[in-house]
Amino acid sequence: MAKIRAKNNVEIQKMRAAGKLAAEVLDHLTPQIRVGMTTEEINQICHDFIIANNATPAPLNYRGFPKSVCTSLNEVVCHGIPSEQDVLKDGDIINVDVTVIVDGFHGDHSRMYLVGNVTDEKRQLVEDTYEAMMLGIKTVKSGSFLSDIGKAIQTFAEGKGYSVVREYCGHGIGRIFHEEPMVLHYDPQDPNYDMRLKKGMTFTIEPMINLGVAGNHVLEDDWTVITDDGKASAQFEHTIVVTETGCEILTQSPKGLHKPPYSAA
Ligand code: MF3
Ligand code: CO
Ligand code: CO
């Protein structure tokens, strides 16, 4: 049972600013997603917006990652590298994962986008993955168990016939991009993993849910993670702070563009 330090009010205020900018990056990107654009264009749009707001894209050069955001298409589970070779086509689903550093603090946030006409199966996967994340978030309050998050996500996702990725997890976040605790999206049934959450703790919840098998592997580029069966994977991510009665979502969309379809907003 790890000891996790809660953030103080000054730190939480800075986390709010970072989280807000991360959400604004994706709000800015949302109306620009279209068939025929490349994932490198998505990277450029996000990068330019982050720089224009005097912030830093955390992924750039992080452990050698070459771009400012992650773009994960269809069977890519996470950590997809933006490329001029990757063109969005009708029927694609894509996750764009943005992490910004504002005044020394990180805000980490991702959403899915539907490109053109997406099959009902993939559209439903995206919808259900958003719900899985929100069900995990809803378990959080001062005194709740860390494992309640993964339990809620796994029960819901597997109940719908999906599988939950185990190799990648949510994480504590603050001045450091990835810190303790690890936030699993399934129940490890391990008392050593568990702990009580405390007011002021900041971490991400970012379930990756697969249409087919949970198994996945990393490509030759050492980053891109794809499903073993080539079926689609979806992910949403929020950064949150634990409060007395629940939690505050630090990466809430100021424009209400939290999940597709985005056209209504
Ligand atoms: N944003 C990812 C996360 O949610 C981490 C990306 S690390 C990178 O934790 F190096 F791939 F950018
Ligand atoms: Co994260
Ligand atoms: Co992220």
Image: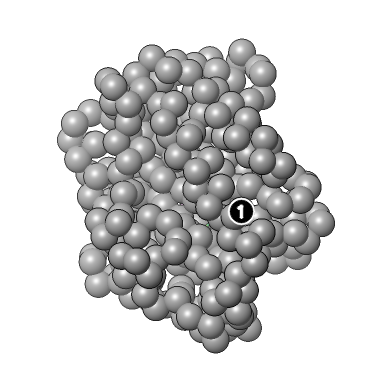
Residue 258, relative to residue 73: is it above or below? above
Q: Quadrant of residue 48?
A: bottom left
Q: Give the number of callouts.
A: 1
Outermost right residue = 229
Residue designated by label 1: 125
Residue 154, relative to residue 254: is it above or below? above
Secondary structure type for disc 1: helix
Q: Residue at x 38, y 43 (%)?
A: 239
- Give coordinates of residue 148: x percent, y percent: 52, 23
- Rendered image coloring scheme: one colour
Q: Is residue 32 left or right of residue 145?
A: left
Residue 101 or 194: which is nearer the viewer? 194
- Give coordinates of residue 165: x percent, y percent: 67, 43
Kind of residue sitting beneath label 1? Leu
- Give coordinates of residue 97: x percent, y percent: 47, 59
Q: Residue at x 43, y 56 (%)?
A: 259
